[in-house]
Image (spheres, rainbow, N blue to C red):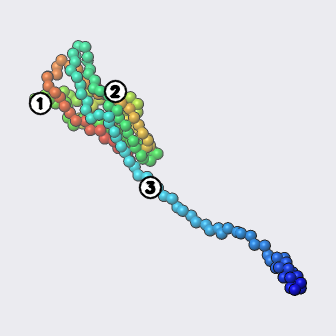
Amino acid sequence: MMKAVWGSVFTAAAILVCASPVSAQPATHGATVNVSAEVKAKAKLTLSGLTATFSDADPDTFTTVSAAAITVDVKARTTASGNVTLTVLANHDLINADAVTIPINQLTWDATGALAAGTMSTTTAQSLGTWTGGGTQTGTQTYKLVNSWDYKTGTYTAAITYTLTAP
Protein backbone atom coordinates (compact mmCIF):
# COMPACT_ATOMS: atom_id res chain seq x y z
CA MET A 1 0.00 0.00 0.00
CA MET A 2 2.97 2.18 0.65
CA LYS A 3 3.99 1.78 -2.96
CA ALA A 4 0.58 2.97 -4.13
CA VAL A 5 0.78 6.14 -1.97
CA TRP A 6 4.29 6.95 -3.11
CA GLY A 7 3.26 6.25 -6.68
CA SER A 8 0.37 8.71 -6.41
CA VAL A 9 2.65 11.38 -4.89
CA PHE A 10 5.20 10.97 -7.69
CA THR A 11 2.46 11.09 -10.31
CA ALA A 12 1.01 14.26 -8.83
CA ALA A 13 4.46 15.84 -8.61
CA ALA A 14 5.22 14.90 -12.21
CA ILE A 15 1.98 16.47 -13.35
CA LEU A 16 2.76 19.70 -11.49
CA VAL A 17 6.33 19.87 -12.83
CA CYS A 18 5.40 19.08 -16.41
CA ALA A 19 2.31 21.26 -16.61
CA SER A 20 2.82 24.61 -18.26
CA PRO A 21 1.79 27.61 -16.24
CA VAL A 22 -1.66 28.96 -17.08
CA SER A 23 -2.20 32.70 -16.88
CA ALA A 24 -5.50 34.52 -17.45
CA GLN A 25 -5.18 36.71 -20.51
CA PRO A 26 -8.03 39.11 -21.32
CA ALA A 27 -9.56 38.89 -24.75
CA THR A 28 -9.17 42.16 -26.64
CA HIS A 29 -11.39 43.16 -29.54
CA GLY A 30 -11.40 46.52 -31.32
CA ALA A 31 -14.46 48.53 -32.29
CA THR A 32 -15.01 52.07 -33.50
CA VAL A 33 -18.04 54.25 -32.90
CA ASN A 34 -18.52 57.14 -35.29
CA VAL A 35 -20.25 60.14 -33.71
CA SER A 36 -22.12 62.68 -35.80
CA ALA A 37 -24.05 65.79 -34.73
CA GLU A 38 -25.99 67.91 -37.19
CA VAL A 39 -26.14 71.59 -36.22
CA LYS A 40 -28.38 73.76 -38.38
CA ALA A 41 -28.70 77.52 -38.57
CA LYS A 42 -31.27 78.94 -36.18
CA ALA A 43 -32.33 82.42 -35.16
CA LYS A 44 -34.52 83.60 -32.31
CA LEU A 45 -35.73 87.10 -31.45
CA THR A 46 -37.35 87.98 -28.13
CA LEU A 47 -38.77 91.42 -27.30
CA SER A 48 -39.78 92.36 -23.75
CA GLY A 49 -42.83 94.25 -24.96
CA LEU A 50 -44.92 94.57 -28.08
CA THR A 51 -46.25 98.08 -27.45
CA ALA A 52 -44.52 101.46 -27.43
CA THR A 53 -46.78 104.10 -25.91
CA PHE A 54 -46.00 107.81 -25.76
CA SER A 55 -47.63 110.00 -23.13
CA ASP A 56 -48.83 113.47 -24.05
CA ALA A 57 -46.51 116.29 -22.94
CA ASP A 58 -46.05 120.02 -23.46
CA PRO A 59 -43.84 120.51 -26.56
CA ASP A 60 -42.23 123.60 -24.98
CA THR A 61 -41.04 121.48 -22.06
CA PHE A 62 -40.42 118.16 -23.84
CA THR A 63 -39.19 118.36 -27.43
CA THR A 64 -39.34 114.57 -27.59
CA VAL A 65 -41.38 112.02 -25.68
CA SER A 66 -40.09 108.54 -24.93
CA ALA A 67 -41.76 105.17 -24.63
CA ALA A 68 -40.64 102.56 -22.11
CA ALA A 69 -37.48 100.72 -23.14
CA ILE A 70 -37.86 97.42 -24.96
CA THR A 71 -35.34 94.70 -24.18
CA VAL A 72 -34.19 92.96 -27.35
CA ASP A 73 -32.60 89.48 -27.15
CA VAL A 74 -31.11 87.97 -30.29
CA LYS A 75 -29.90 84.38 -30.46
CA ALA A 76 -28.37 83.05 -33.66
CA ARG A 77 -26.55 79.93 -34.73
CA THR A 78 -24.63 80.27 -37.98
CA THR A 79 -21.20 79.78 -39.50
CA ALA A 80 -18.20 81.59 -38.02
CA SER A 81 -18.31 84.12 -40.87
CA GLY A 82 -22.11 84.27 -41.21
CA ASN A 83 -23.69 87.71 -40.89
CA VAL A 84 -26.60 88.08 -38.49
CA THR A 85 -28.79 91.14 -39.04
CA LEU A 86 -31.71 92.66 -37.18
CA THR A 87 -33.76 95.34 -38.91
CA VAL A 88 -36.93 97.34 -38.26
CA LEU A 89 -39.41 98.72 -40.79
CA ALA A 90 -42.68 100.62 -40.25
CA ASN A 91 -45.72 99.60 -42.27
CA HIS A 92 -46.75 103.26 -42.74
CA ASP A 93 -46.51 106.71 -41.16
CA LEU A 94 -48.18 107.23 -37.81
CA ILE A 95 -51.87 107.73 -38.61
CA ASN A 96 -54.95 108.63 -36.58
CA ALA A 97 -58.66 107.80 -37.05
CA ASP A 98 -59.12 110.90 -39.25
CA ALA A 99 -56.30 109.72 -41.58
CA VAL A 100 -54.03 112.53 -40.36
CA THR A 101 -50.40 111.44 -40.29
CA ILE A 102 -47.19 112.15 -38.48
CA PRO A 103 -44.22 111.25 -40.69
CA ILE A 104 -42.59 108.06 -39.42
CA ASN A 105 -39.13 109.68 -39.56
CA GLN A 106 -40.23 111.65 -36.48
CA LEU A 107 -39.83 108.34 -34.65
CA THR A 108 -36.24 107.57 -33.61
CA TRP A 109 -34.68 105.28 -31.04
CA ASP A 110 -31.78 105.19 -28.66
CA ALA A 111 -30.06 101.88 -28.05
CA THR A 112 -27.81 100.18 -25.53
CA GLY A 113 -25.78 97.00 -25.52
CA ALA A 114 -25.34 95.33 -28.90
CA LEU A 115 -27.98 97.49 -30.60
CA ALA A 116 -27.59 100.62 -32.75
CA ALA A 117 -29.61 103.86 -32.58
CA GLY A 118 -31.56 104.96 -35.64
CA THR A 119 -34.51 106.62 -37.36
CA MET A 120 -37.62 104.76 -38.51
CA SER A 121 -38.54 104.41 -42.19
CA THR A 122 -41.44 103.03 -44.21
CA THR A 123 -39.34 102.31 -47.30
CA THR A 124 -35.97 101.00 -46.15
CA ALA A 125 -35.43 98.51 -43.33
CA GLN A 126 -33.27 100.19 -40.72
CA SER A 127 -30.44 98.31 -39.02
CA LEU A 128 -30.87 97.67 -35.33
CA GLY A 129 -27.81 95.41 -35.22
CA THR A 130 -25.34 93.42 -37.33
CA TRP A 131 -23.04 90.67 -36.01
CA THR A 132 -20.66 88.09 -37.43
CA GLY A 133 -20.98 84.49 -36.30
CA GLY A 134 -23.47 82.96 -33.92
CA GLY A 135 -24.11 83.80 -30.32
CA THR A 136 -26.36 85.90 -28.13
CA GLN A 137 -26.75 89.67 -28.34
CA THR A 138 -28.81 91.78 -25.94
CA GLY A 139 -29.66 95.44 -25.65
CA THR A 140 -32.46 97.90 -25.08
CA GLN A 141 -34.27 100.08 -27.58
CA THR A 142 -36.07 103.24 -26.44
CA TYR A 143 -38.38 104.82 -29.01
CA LYS A 144 -38.56 108.62 -29.04
CA LEU A 145 -41.11 110.76 -30.89
CA VAL A 146 -40.55 114.39 -31.81
CA ASN A 147 -43.16 116.39 -29.86
CA SER A 148 -44.72 119.22 -31.88
CA TRP A 149 -47.44 121.86 -31.55
CA ASP A 150 -48.27 121.13 -35.21
CA TYR A 151 -49.66 117.65 -34.54
CA LYS A 152 -53.44 117.30 -34.74
CA THR A 153 -55.16 115.64 -31.78
CA GLY A 154 -55.86 111.92 -31.89
CA THR A 155 -54.28 108.58 -31.24
CA TYR A 156 -51.72 107.72 -33.89
CA THR A 157 -50.61 104.18 -34.69
CA ALA A 158 -48.24 102.25 -36.93
CA ALA A 159 -46.88 98.72 -36.90
CA ILE A 160 -43.16 98.05 -36.86
CA THR A 161 -41.78 94.77 -38.16
CA TYR A 162 -38.57 93.36 -36.71
CA THR A 163 -36.70 91.00 -39.03
CA LEU A 164 -33.87 88.76 -37.80
CA THR A 165 -31.80 87.09 -40.50
CA ALA A 166 -29.07 84.49 -39.99
CA PRO A 167 -27.71 82.42 -42.89
Q: Is residue 82 left or right of residue 67?
A: right
Coordinates of residue 50 in the picture (x, y in percent): 27, 35
Q: Observer-nearest residue: 88 or 33?
A: 33
Label 3 CA crowd tier, 10 Å (few <14, some 14–19, many 20+)? few
Q: Residue at x 46, y 45 (%)?
A: 80
The quadrant in which residue 72 appears is top left
Quadrant in the rendering for residue 49: top left
Mark-to-mark CA distance, 2 and 3: 39 Å
- Residue 11 sits in quarter: bottom right
Q: Earlier in the sequence, mark 2 or mark 3?
A: 3
SS class, disc 2: strand
Q: Is residue 112 visible?
A: yes
User: What kind of residue is marked 2?
Assistant: Asp
For disc 3, the marked residue is: 38
Q: Residue at x 22, y 35 (%)?
A: 159
**First along the sequence among labels 1 and 3:** 3
The residue wearing badge 2 is 110
Relative to 90, say whether 152 is above or below.
above
In front: label 2 or label 3: 3
Q: Is residue 34 left or right of residue 14?
A: left
Image location of residue 124, percent across then percent down? 27, 36
Q: Residues within 10 Å of mark 1 (few under 14, many from 20)?
A: few
Query: Which element carries disc 1, helix, strand or loop?
Result: loop
**Mark 1 and mark 3: Cα distance apart in space:** 52 Å
Please report the residue visible at 17 percent of the width from the left and 28 percent of the height from the top.
Answer: 156
- Can you say which quadrant of the picture contains the N terminus? bottom right
Q: Residue at x 89, y 84 (%)?
A: 2
The residue to which callout 1 is attached is 97
